[in-house]
Image: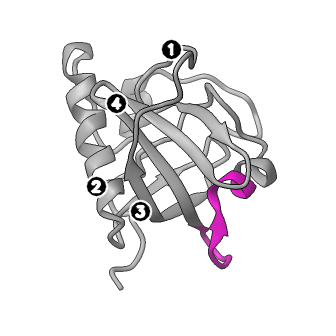
Amino acid sequence: LVLTGDHIDADEAYRIGFLQKLVPYDQLDAAVEAWLTSLLACGPRARFLTPAGTTVQVLKASLRPEPSGAAPGVPGAIGPVEPGKGFFVRFSGGSLFLEELKPEGRGPVGAAAFLNGARLGPGDALIVPPAGNEGPEK
């Protein structure tokens, strides 16, 4: 999909294992909040996928309000970036500030530096890994 640019609907993405679960729209905020709670715990399953398919483990995160005047965004999307510090991920109850990440096959890196290297920025969506793609328990 990344190479072809083909578009698929949610049912097909779930069927081929790209999505861990499907939820009705009215339950989306709760599902994203559950995922962000897991990220905040920074355990070995605190991971997300980039749109390019890179698995990234969250090593350090905190709940923080976004800066005043930040543009609104959707749950799971990258919010404001604090250069040299990290970035916000939005959910209905507030924002999670990611500070340190570990991309698959690499060592720990600051979250803001990761965004630069991954060519991601505000508005880009982070993806919950499909079941079985959470990485090893350590």
4 or 1: tag closer to the N-terminus: 1
Mark in the foreground, 4 or 3: 4
3 or 2: tag closer to the N-terminus: 2
* CA distance for labels 3 and 1: 30 Å
Element type where label 4 sits in the image: strand
Mark in the foreground, 4 or 2: 4
Please tell me the numbered disc located at residue 133: 3
Give the quarter of the image for residue 137. bottom left
Kind of residue at disc 4: Gly
Q: Is residue 106 magenta?
A: yes
Report if residue 16 is visible in the image.
Answer: no
Q: Quadrant of the C terminus?
A: bottom left
Does the residue at mark 2 contact the one at mark 1 (Cβ under 8 Å)?
no
* CA distance for labels 4 and 1: 11 Å
Does the residue at mark 4 contact the one at mark 1 (Cβ under 8 Å)?
no
Please tell me the numbered disc located at residue 38: 2
Residue 85 image position (x, y, % from top left):
64, 54
4 or 2: tag closer to the N-terminus: 2
